[in-house]
């Protein structure tokens, strides 16, 4: 009986970590090398360290609140519960915009990877492949979280294996001088992309559900999951920037093929499709769940909420990958992060203090970092 209990506990823990990794490692990983190559790899690593820790604090804060509640709420309803209706609505708008922005980015780059794989056989413009990627993903999204949970173990494993293959195969081509480039005029460029690449708040309720009676392990699962993500980001961006330097392309992979060979484009595009497709489905499920659980929408109405807006944005011309993920992370992601901090502080006055262990001074430091980053992001758009 003890062996079975430990096995069940371990399996739940591993699956929850996989859920976080599968959600976080998405399209953002492909934007990191480009912004690091422009601002400087060492500047990028500093962003990864600081914003990785910021993300850990935010996800842990939400996790602690979630573990104290038996309600099946998402972020917006949790914010409404602790901060009131107005801020709950602000959270809803920011959450939907953040998820839609991410799904738009998935359409853009998912189609580019599909084009890289199939263009030798199908000579169509990239926009056709982007529409095909969207149509297939939207159709499979109807299966909801049940489909995601069945494919997630395999997809995360395949993703990590393919990342390792492309990193090992590209290592002999690294020029270390590419990692010492520094451009102070673009020092703020990585903020939105890096913060976007750590987005994992929405999967916290699913992680809690996966852990079930072992939900006390949520904090450790978050730490391990984000730690693995950070290591993958450091290695992947280091290899890509080391090989392609200042000519790194926005999606990282296609430019790598010019130096390493066509095999890198094939393997890299497979990595991209696995990561982007999985994350598109997971984020789509989160939008659906918010619509269904928090706004009492019917199942297919929730599905429509998830897919219509990003596709319309794509159709009207929002197709610059770095701009989309940078603005999404640097503005909407920051708004959500600030609301989580405010919610956590309010929850300290209501929930048992022993369950909410993050000190206010640390939360204030995180808030300052987020506000400065959002100002820099908006300023970059204006100028």
Image: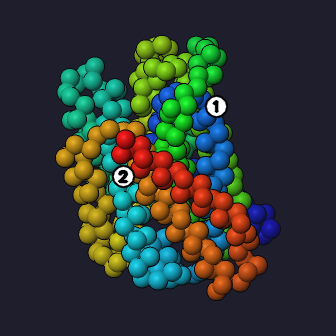
Residue situated furthest front in the rendering: 383
The residue closer to the viewer here, 346 or 104, is 346
> Where is 288 relative to 347, above or below?
above
The x, y position of residue 362, in whole percent, is 70, 63
- Crowdedness of circle 2 by 10 Å Cα count: few (<14), some, many (20+)? many
> Which one is closest to the eye, mark 2 or mark 1?
1
> Where is 41 relative to 174, above or below?
below
Residue situated furthest right in the rendering: 2
Q: Which mark is residue 273?
A: none
Q: Left or right: 306 with respect to 46? A: left
The x, y position of residue 335, in whole percent, is 47, 62
Q: Residue at x 59, y 36 (%)?
A: 44
Separation of marks 2 and 1 at Cα, in angstroms = 28 Å
For label 2, the SS is: helix
**Is there a contact, CB below 8 Å, between mark 2 and mark 1?**
no
Residue 359: image quadrant is bottom right
The residue closer to the viewer here, 337 or 144, is 337
For label 1, the SS is: helix
- Crowdedness of circle 1 by 10 Å Cα count: few (<14), some, many (20+)? some
Residue 36: image quadrant is top right
Q: Is residue 151 visible?
A: no
Quadrant showing the N terminus = bottom right
Mark sitting earlier along the chain (2/1):
1
> Where is 123 relative to 235, above or below?
above
Q: Is residue 89 visible?
A: yes
Q: Residue at x 47, y 57 (%)?
A: 333
Q: Residue at x 57, y 72 (%)?
A: 342
The x, y position of residue 9, in whole percent, is 71, 64
Structure colour scheme: rainbow
**Residue topped by disc 2:** 101
**Residue topped by disc 1:** 42
Q: Residue at x 64, y 86 (%)?
A: 350
């Amino acid at each position: 009986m003890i062996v079975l209990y430990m096995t069940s506990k371990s399996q739940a823990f591993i699956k929850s970590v996989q859920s976080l990794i599968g959600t976080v490692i998405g399209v953002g990983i492909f934007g990191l090398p480009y912004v690091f190559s422009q601002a400087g790899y060492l500047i990028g690593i500093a962003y990864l360290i600081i914003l990785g820790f910021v993300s850990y604090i935010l996800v842990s804060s939400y996790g602690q609140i979630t573990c104290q509640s038996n309600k099946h709420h998402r972020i917006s309803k949790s914010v409404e519960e602790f901060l009131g209706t107005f801020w709950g609505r602000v959270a809803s708008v920011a959450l939907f915009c953040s998820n839609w922005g991410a799904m738009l980015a998935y359409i853009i780059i998912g189609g580019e990877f599909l084009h890289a794989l199939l263009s030798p056989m199908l000579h169509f413009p990239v926009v056709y492949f982007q529409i095909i990627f969207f149509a297939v993903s939207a159709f499979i999204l109807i299966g909801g979280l049940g489909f995601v949970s069945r494919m997630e173990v395999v997809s995360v494993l395949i993703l990590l294996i393919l990342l390792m293959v492309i990193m090992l195969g590209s290592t002999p081509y690294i020029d270390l001088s590419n990692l010492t480039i520094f451009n102070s005029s673009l020092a703020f460029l990585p903020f939105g992309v890096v913060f976007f690449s750590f987005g994992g708040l929405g999967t916290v309720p699913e992680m809690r559900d996966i852990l079930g009676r072992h939900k006390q392990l949520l904090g450790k699962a978050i730490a391990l999951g984000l730690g693995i993500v950070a290591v993958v980001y450091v290695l992947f961006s280091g290899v890509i920037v080391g090989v392609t330097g200042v000519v790194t392309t926005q999606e990282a992979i296609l430019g790598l093929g010019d130096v390493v060979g066509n095999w890198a484009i094939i393997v890299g595009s497979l990595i991209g499709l696995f990561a982007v497709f999985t994350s598109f489905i997971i984020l789509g499920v989160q939008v659906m769940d918010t619509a269904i659980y928090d706004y009492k929408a019917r199942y297919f109405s929730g599905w429509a909420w998830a897919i219509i807006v990003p596709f319309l944005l794509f159709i009207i011309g929002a197709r610059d990958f770095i701009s989309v993920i940078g603005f999404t992370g640097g503005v909407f992601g920051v708004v959500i992060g600030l609301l989580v901090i405010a919610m956590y502080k309010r929850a300290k006055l209501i929930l048992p203090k022993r369950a909410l262990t993050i000190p206010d001074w640390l939360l204030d430091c995180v808030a300052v970092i987020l506000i400065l980053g959002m100002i820099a992001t908006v300023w970059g758009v204006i100028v």
